[in-house]
Image (cartoon, grey):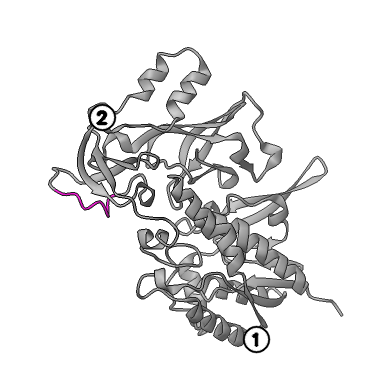
């Protein structure tokens, strides 16, 4: 008698993981489910957001309907230490982290994997919209992380920090299916998650009022909002052209801009520079300007927030970004750029952003990414991910 391979599916209570579990059973796997409790404090979530108690109820109903065992593990301490505390530290330092990327690297593909191994899984699976395959190269197997077939739901960006070891044992059952089809399957099976809305906000926490969430650990500090006129924004492209040294050109194109209060005029006050991020419009409470104000920079040391008028203010756009060498991560280490080399890639700096043409330059101190077209809202602390066609090759934290 043939022994079935065991797969542990991360069952969140959402429609994607529910259908993923069903498809694994249809493919002949011995399927068990795992529900992880990662956040218990519902006081910071906005009204109407599902709590983990509601999620686990749906997960139990789905597991019963599919006739698969459901394991429950409380990993809230791991989540606080590896994701939430990291978020607080980054915001305090004036950077804008991406908790979903960290959640996948530290929780779903670490704590979850370890628990699945304890249960005796041959594979573990998630409901992410992405794909995986493998190739042989010089006698070695390499696992490829590919974009999901559904262009509107591709979630490969969220997995941009995964390693070859993490990819080796993972399955993505819905990666080649369109979202409407996933909903259709769930409705046909009458799964409890069929009509459940997609999760929003912070991974495992939900949709939150960010300042309220951050005030759990970060204190309010009244500071000035300084408006910077467009005429004060330097033209880095022209400056770079005037320089002969390549390294100097890259530094000009990829460095974060710095402002001072003397560069503009005070237009209001804020409650703490660490509560705000580049590109943000809401929450400033400053009116009376011909065009809406957008945040173009923050200085947490001086507790200043810098703004510019209009969505096309030049302070919102940059030609490139820099990733320090200790923050560069290659999913495909065999394709890593050598020092003093460069190549063309497709790059995105946020989830669901269209891929942008860019050139990556590997230098001794790190990776410089220069875009063909200036990009809006490049933000320190976020992740830049680079692709060749539909394969995600690497990523790094923007300095």
Q: Residues within 10 Å of mark 1 (few under 14, many from 20)?
A: few
* Residue under the point 61% across and 69% down: 75
Residue that badge 1 annotates:
67
- The mark total stands at 2
- Which region of the structure is painted magenta? 281-287
Q: Is residue 131 left or right of residue 292?
A: right
Point out residue 154 in the picture as x, y percentages from the top left corner.
Answer: 50, 56
* Residue under the point 58% across and 69% down: 76
From this viewpoint, is residue 388 visible? Answer: no
Answer with the quarter of the image where residue 362 lies.
Answer: top right
Q: Is residue 297 above or below residue 272?
A: above
Which quadrant would the N terminus be assigned to in this image? bottom right
Q: Is residue 316 left or right of residue 115?
A: left
Q: Nearer the viewer, residue 22 or 315?
A: 315
Q: Is residue 42 left or right of residue 28?
A: left
Residue that badge 2 annotates:
262
Q: Is residue 352 above or below residue 115?
A: above
């Amino acid at each position: 008698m043939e022994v079935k391979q065991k797969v542990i599916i991360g069952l969140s209570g959402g429609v994607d993981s529910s259908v993923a579990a069903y498809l694994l059973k249809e493919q002949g796997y011995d399927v068990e489910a795992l529900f992880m409790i990662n956040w218990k404090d519902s006081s910071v979530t906005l009204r109407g957001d599902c709590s983990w108690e509601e999620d686990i109820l749906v997960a139990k109903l789905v597991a019963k309907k599919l006739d698969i065992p459901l394991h429950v593990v409380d990993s809230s301490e791991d989540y606080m230490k590896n994701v939430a505390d990291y978020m607080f530290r980054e915001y305090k330092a004036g950077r804008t982290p991406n908790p979903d990327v960290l959640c996948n690297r530290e929780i779903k593909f670490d704590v979850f994997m370890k628990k699945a191994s304890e249960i005796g899984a041959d594979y573990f699976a998630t409901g992410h919209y992405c794909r995986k395959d493998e190739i042989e190269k010089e006698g070695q197997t390499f696992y490829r992380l590919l974009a999901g077939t559904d262009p509107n739901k591709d979630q490969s960006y969220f997995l941009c920090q995964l390693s070859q070891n993490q990819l080796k044992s993972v399955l993505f059952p819905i990666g080649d299916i369109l979202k409407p089809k996933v909903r259709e399957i769930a409705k046909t099976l009458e799964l409890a998650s069929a009509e459940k809305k997609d999760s929003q906000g912070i991974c495992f926490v939900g949709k939150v009022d960010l300042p309220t969430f951050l005030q759990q650990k970060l204190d309010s500090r009244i500071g000035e909002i300084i408006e910077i006129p467009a005429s004060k924004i330097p033209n880095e492209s022209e400056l770079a052209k005037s320089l002969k040294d390549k390294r100097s050109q890259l530094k000009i194109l990829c460095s974060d801009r710095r402002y001072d209060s003397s560069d503009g005029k005070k237009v209001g006050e804020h409650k703490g520079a660490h509560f705000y991020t580049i590109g943000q419009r809401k929450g400033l409470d400053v009116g009376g300007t011909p065009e809406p104000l957008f945040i173009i920079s923050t200085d947490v040391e001086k507790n200043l927030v810098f703004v510019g008028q209009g969505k096309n203010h030049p302070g919102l756009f940059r030609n490139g970004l820099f990733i320090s060498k200790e923050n560069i991560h290659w999913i495909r280490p065999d394709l890593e750029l050598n020092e003093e080399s460069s190549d063309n890639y497709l790059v995105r700096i946020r989830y669901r952003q269209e891929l942008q043409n860019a050139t990556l330059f590997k230098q001794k101190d790190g990776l410089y990414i220069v875009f063909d077209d200036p990009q809006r809202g490049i933000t320190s602390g976020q992740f830049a991910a680079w692709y060749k066609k539909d394969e995600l090759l690497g990523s790094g934290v923007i300095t």
